[in-house]
Amino acid sequence: MITFLDLIPKSEFRDFVANRIASSIGETYNFPIVFPKLYRYRSLSKYSIDDIIKCQLTLSSIGEFNDIFDGAIHQYGSKEEIEKKAEAHWNEYDELLKGFPSARSILKRDTIIENSKRHFKTESRLKFRELDYLGTYVCCFSEENTSTLMWSHYADSNKGICIEYDFNTLNDDNLIRNSVFPIAYTESPIKVTDLLEDEKNKIFQYPIDAAVLCSALNKAKVWCYEKEWRMVSVLTFLEEEIQRIPIQLPIKPSKVYLGYHFLKPFFYYKSENQSDKDKRKSKIQEFMKLIDYLKNNQIPVAVMIPSIGSYNLKPCDITIDALESFMKQHFENRQLTSIRFYYTLHDRLLDLLEK
């Protein structure tokens, strides 16, 4: 049995999907031969640090995403479309029953049409969330590492990190490399109804798989600021629903960017209890593990700094030795620091960056 993962590397499948997307959006759309540097925004959590240290990516179920239309398949969307489809369904029945007058007297037109409308309405709702049912998992990246919106939305309000990957270092036939695609942003959803109804494979040999990938790579134009790329995988063999799935990555990050406020999670508020303070100590310990990993693997680091006089962020490189020394001086083997002193230490970090 041919699976979605088997189809992903095949040129005929890739060409069909790329051409279908291009014809729907009215402009050129190509799957990449050469990748730009891609960036993954994360909170500075144990899970994101573990992903880096373990050299893995975590894919999330597409049904968990913040955009209600993400991965949605649009079929029989309007009342008019449903009525038109139900009428066509009756016409098919009517044609079949021409030679059977007794059956024709039993099967009433209005009854058939009403039943068909209910069926297509239910079918429309099921198709809208079908990618989630199928076990579609996605990992999101961006072409941009300086987006203020992305740092705010996906990197814990500038307290998180942004991880740079260079997929060009993977072999051309690597499945992970072949599973990463740019998003097509459109004013209205890409139409795949004909593929869903292609039961005899007249349009394409694998119509459902093509419809799935078209829908997974299509988002509303309002999201275009994200300049998103995504790794897509359909895991129909899973026996139960899993929210997130880690996969091994054969490459390490090429660089790590720290948010402007990455130090803030290490400070405590007066109202916090001992349990909260212990969690903050644990955050410091996890961050020191990340520093050790970056140091041992010679992965460069930068801190995102706001440009005074503009709304732009810019990366400011810092040596891993300087960052390690700063963290040990102010956080290692010391009591946690109150939030009232946050900007005092933050200014010291800025002074270090300016050097």
Image (cartoon, rainbow, N blue to C red):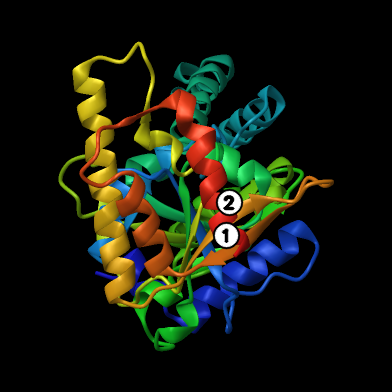
Q: Quadrant of residue 30?
A: bottom right
Residue at 42% x, 65% y is: 322
* Quadrant in the picture for the N terminus: bottom left
The location of residue 346, given as percent across then percent down, is 52, 42
Q: Is residue 78 above or below residue 9?
A: above
The location of residue 116, given as percent across then percent down, is 51, 25
Q: Nearer the viewer, residue 149 or 323?
A: 323
| Residue picked out by circle 2 | 350
Instruction: Report helix, strand or loop for mark 1.
Output: helix
Instruction: Find out whether the residues at labels 2 and 1 contact each other: C-beta distance under 8 Å.
Output: yes
Residue at 65% x, 42% y is: 149
Q: Is residue 33 above or below residue 255?
A: below
Residue at 42% x, 43% y is: 43
Residue 44 in sight from this viewpoint:
yes
Q: Residues within 10 Å of mark 1 (few under 14, many from 20)?
A: some
- CA gap between label 2 and label 1 equals 5 Å
| Residue picked out by circle 1 | 353
The three-letter code of the residue at mark 2 reads Leu
Q: On the rendered structure, is 158 left or right of 131?
A: right
* Quadrant in the picture for the C terminus: bottom right
Instruction: Report helix, strand or loop for mark 2.
Output: helix
Residue 194 in sight from this viewpoint:
no
Q: Residues within 10 Å of mark 2 (few under 14, many from 20)?
A: some
The three-letter code of the residue at mark 1 reads Leu
Q: Quadrant of residue 279?
A: top left
Q: On the rendered structure, is 292 left or right of 318?
A: left
The location of residue 296, given as percent across then percent down, is 27, 75
Q: Nearer the viewer, residue 133 or 99?
A: 133
Residue at 36% x, 78% y is: 298
Q: Nearer the viewer, residue 316 or 189?
A: 316
